[in-house]
Image: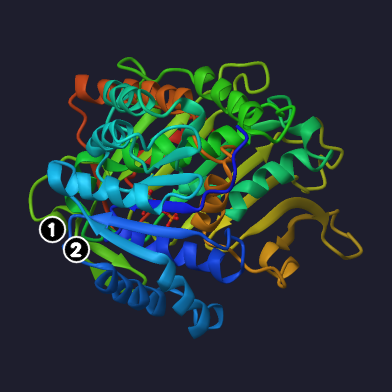
Amino acid sequence: MSARPASLLVIFGATGDLAQRMLLPSMYGLYRDGLLPADIRILGTARGALDDAGFRAGVAETLAKRVAVGDRDAASIQRFLEAVHYQAAAIDDAVAAKALTDRICAMTRGDVVYHLSTAPRFYAPICDLLGAAGLAGAGTRVMLEKPIGHDLGSAIAINNGVTRVFDEARVFRVDHYLGKEGVQNLLALRFGNALFEPLWNARHIEQVQITVAETIGVEGRGDYYDDSGASRDMLQNHLLQLLCLTAMEPPSHFDPGAVRDEKLKVLRSLRPIGINEVAAHSVAGQYTNGAVDAATVPGYRDELGRASSTETYIALRAHIDNWRWSGVPFYLRTGKRMPRRCTEIYLQFRAVPHSIFKGTGAHADPNALVIKLQPEERIELMLMHKTPGLDRSGLKLAQVTLDLDVHDAFAQSRRRLAYERLYLDAIEGNGTLFVRRDETEAAWQWIDGILDGWRAHAVQPKSYPAGTWGPSSSVALTERHGHSWRE
Ligand code: BG6
């Protein structure tokens, strides 16, 4: 899609938590560095009865709290605040909605990006409102926050509602993991180096583990989270996107069509985990009280204030049924209240086919590549090395790690918030790092199979104390196949 950089960003849900934590600080970061069109304006809208001045005061507070001192200055904050506006509106209040569309109309001087950061049930009505007001034509695009629905059926309904007004090329579905440097670096690592590609397949890789572990609990988002659980909140989107980038075939170009076509093929090659497979291939967990970072923390039900059978942890043994990955297990897991924050991809290579050191007591562990994405960005390659010495009692091998600290290697480059990248791309009309409709629906189809399987077996999450790596049954998931989780 060829697009001019947008000169108006309209944020729906502008007083919400995401806007405060991420969206406004990201826009400020871009603005301060002169990366946005000089005439950019931001219109926030939400139910709260604020005027421009009231909203700006809140934005000023947010920036003071969220942007590091070295990354902000009074003059650019002042100019940024002047570019920020606010219009109170509720979609079900016709008068307020009309005032909003009038305001958008008055502020429009070129392309417009609408960012819907509200509950997904409002997406279609907001699009209808914009369409009916003639504000959704060529030169406009819409960003949608996750979750796109609750299952395949609701995702289709939302996508139908949105694409009735905005054709698919103008729909930018956000998965903020795709805005992270480390995640994009996966593409650079795989497709910018000739070294890995020959080894990146079932012939050389024994198993893959993708972990997204968080130490936080549900952080006051209990109502949303309890309806979603780890499978919908993290697996359907972030984990599956990481899986796609790890497993996909090389796209012919780094462009929206080619990259997303390849990701889609991975999602469509995922072997279903349904009623007959869930028992052996999935584990659901829920944290009870425990300790994280040396502080005691309540269990999920206590945090929520009621009984619940929502999973705060999920682990799976997945398979991608294609030539490249035939027979290679992809272990996926994500959980809240884990012992440490850690997002990483671990690829264990196959063992050497024949040991020349037999009889010497030397043992060669398989090589492994670990791509660490959070909290630090590192790439580690585990190699076997001779233990120095005269080997009088036989040669010894030890595992050593080639360790690249990406932050150190690029110490001069400023680390950007994921939304800085995503906003810049949406404003410029580049959809490569956004999720296409067919991807999101393929991901739901696979997740629905697992959740249906759980329902059919009345699966209840197994408990695990906060500060541990999930229920003990998750150990069996890997060990049954001769593998162990990396901890
Ligand atoms: C969000 C989930 O999408 O991602 C949250 O809704 C989760 O539950 C968050 O905490 C994790 O994001 P990050 O960037 O902190 O890894």
Q: Amino acid at mark 2?
A: Pro
Alpha-carbon distance for marks 2 and 1?
A: 6 Å
The residue drawn where x is 27% and y is 61% is 15
Circle 2 packing at 10 Å, graded few (<14), some (14-19), many (20+), is some
Res 312 visible: yes
Residue position for label 1: 302
Q: Please determine whether, in this image, residue 321 is positioned above or below residue 436.
A: above
As drawn, which residue projects farthest toward the right? 390
Q: Position of residue 374 (x, y in %)?
A: 53, 58
Is 386 left, or right, of 201 in this rendering?
right
Residue 452 lies left or right of residue 90; in this view the side is right
Q: Where residue 133 sits in the image (x, y, percent)? A: 30, 36
The residue lying at 34 percent from left, 63 percent from top is 85
Asked where in the image residue 165 lies, by quadrant, the reply is: top left
Q: Label 2: state its secondary structure.
A: loop
Q: Give the residue type that dot 1 points to.
A: Asp
Q: Residue at x 58, y 48 (%)?
A: 5
Q: Nearest the camera: 212 or 428?
A: 428
**Looking at this rendering, what residue extends furthest in the front direction?**
106
Give the labeled residue for mark 2: 298
Q: Position of residue 396 (x, y in %)?
A: 81, 55
Quadrant of residue 193 within the rendered picture: top right
Tell me where residue 444 appears, x and y as whole percent: 37, 26
- The answer to which quarter of the image holds residue 453 is top left
Is residue 476 visible to us here?
A: no
**Rendered view: 178 above or below 236:** below
Q: Residue furthest left?
A: 306
Look at the numbered discs 2 and 1 and tell me whether their residues touch, using CB distance below 8 Å.
yes
